[in-house]
Image (cartoon, helix red, strand yellow):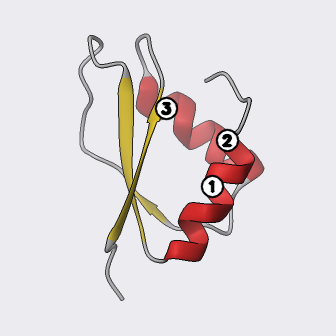
Amino acid sequence: MTFKYTFTFPISGPNKLPRFKAWAAEHAPEIPVSLPPQVSAKNETLTVRLKSVEDRQTLTTRLAGVAL
């Protein structure tokens, strides 16, 4: 199965990938994600790739109100 779906959410500042990885490991370890190799510090968003629509919905719900 491939990562067919994307989810883009607001995140600012440096070290976006390590911050998201740490959050995902703690709050959503069962959701497999594919991350880009790097993200510019100037970007204000992060796009992750997911395997299913259900994973995207779960991630959306869990990220609601979270400040990364």
Please indicate whether residue 14 sits to the left or right of residue 55 in the image: left
Please indicate whether residue 57 sits to the left or right of residue 34 in the image: right
Q: Which quarter of the figure has residue 17?
A: top left
Q: Nearer the viewer, residue 59 or 36?
A: 59
Mark 3 or 2: in front is: 2
Q: Where is mark 2, residue-wise?
A: 63
Q: Are dots 1 and 2 in contact, CB under 8 Å? A: yes
Q: Amino acid under label 2?
A: Leu
- Looking at the picture, does residue 57 appear above or below residue 23? below
Q: Which quarter of the figure has residue 67?
A: top right
Mark 3 or 1: in front is: 1
Residue found 43% across the figure and 10% down from its top: 13
Q: Where is mark 3, residue-wise?
A: 18
Measured as percent of width and height from the top left, residue 16 is found at 44, 26
Gap in angstroms between the C-alphas marked 3 and 1: 17 Å
Q: Are dots 3 and 1 in contact, CB under 8 Å? A: no
Gap in angstroms between the C-alphas marked 3 and 2: 16 Å
- Looking at the picture, does residue 63 appear above or below residue 57? above
Q: Amino acid under label 1?
A: Leu
Q: Where is mark 1, residue-wise?
A: 59
Q: Secondary structure at mark 2?
A: helix
Q: Secondary structure at mark 3?
A: helix
- Looking at the picture, does residue 15 appear above or below residue 32? above
Measured as percent of width and height from the top left, residue 28 is found at 70, 56
- Comes first in the chain, label 3 or label 2: 3
Q: Secondary structure at mark 1?
A: helix
Residue found 25% across the figure and 34% down from its top: 38
